[in-house]
């Protein structure tokens, strides 16, 4: 299907006369996003405001399927830091829990070995006493 990427700058619309043949609207969105990313730094270098721009993605009939505000480029570049920070905190917390569990497990193993040793000594004494009684 052919998709058209009309560029809106404030109230002004610049229609895309050529368009692109793409398999689906998701791919069209990704192409528009990539183009917006590429344009972002150029616009800033020119002293233009990227935030007043958007792509209106239309089909062959001219029906607008979706709009991609350039603001999404900025928002997407900011979003990964928060989840990564939260993920790191979560992983560090999980690591600390596992360290505490391992320490507790080691302590339990040590106590169990001590009890088994004491139980074996008691069994040995009991066997010795039973042998003497016979």
Image: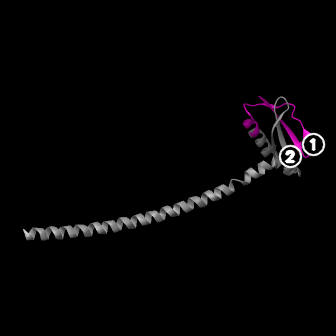
| C-alpha separation, residue under disc 1 versus residue under disc 2 | 9 Å
Q: Residues within 10 Å of mark 2 (few under 14, many from 20)?
A: many
Quadrant into which the N terminus falls: top right
Tell whether position 15 is magenta: yes
Residue 8: percent from left, percent from top: 88, 42
Relative to 100, residue 27 above or below:
above
Q: Which residue is mark 2?
A: 53
108 vs 97, left or right, is: left
First to last magenta residue range:
1-29
Q: Residue at x 13, y 69 (%)?
A: 128
* Residue 20, quarter of the rendered image: top right
Q: Is residue 67 left or right of residue 128?
A: right
- Residue plotted at (71% across, 53% down): 79
Q: Compared to 36, does 113 lie above or below?
A: below
Q: Which mark is residue 67?
A: none
Q: Residue at x 30, y 68 (%)?
A: 115
Residue 18: image location, x then y, percent:
85, 30
Callout 1: few (<14), some (14-19), or many (20+) C-alpha neighbours within 10 Å?
few
Corner quadrant of residue 129:
bottom left
Task: Spot the residue most to the left.
Answer: 134
Q: Is residue 101 magenta?
A: no
- Judging depth in this view, the residue of 78 and 56 nearest the camera is 56
Label 2: which secondary element: strand
> Could you tell me which secondary element the residue under label 1 belongs to?
strand
Question: Could you tell me which quadrant the C terminus lies in?
Answer: bottom left
Q: Residue tagged by mark 1?
A: 12
Q: Image check: 125 left or right of 109?
A: left
């Amino acid at each position: 299907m052919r998709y058209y990427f009309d560029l809106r700058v404030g109230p002004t619309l610049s229609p895309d006369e050529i368009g692109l043949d793409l398999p689906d609207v998701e791919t069209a969105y990704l192409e528009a996003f990539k183009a917006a990313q590429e344009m972002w730094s150029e616009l800033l270098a020119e002293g233009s405001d990227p935030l007043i721009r958007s792509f209106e993605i239309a089909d062959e009939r001219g029906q607008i399927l979706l709009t991609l505000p350039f603001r999404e480029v900025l928002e997407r570049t900011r979003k990964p830091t928060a989840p990564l920070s939260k993920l790191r905190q979560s992983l560090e917390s999980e690591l600390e829990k596992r360290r505490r569990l391992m320490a507790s497990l080691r302590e339990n193993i040590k106590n169990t070995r001590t009890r088994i040793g004491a139980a074996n000594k008691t069994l040995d004494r009991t066997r010795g006493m039973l042998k003497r009684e016979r």
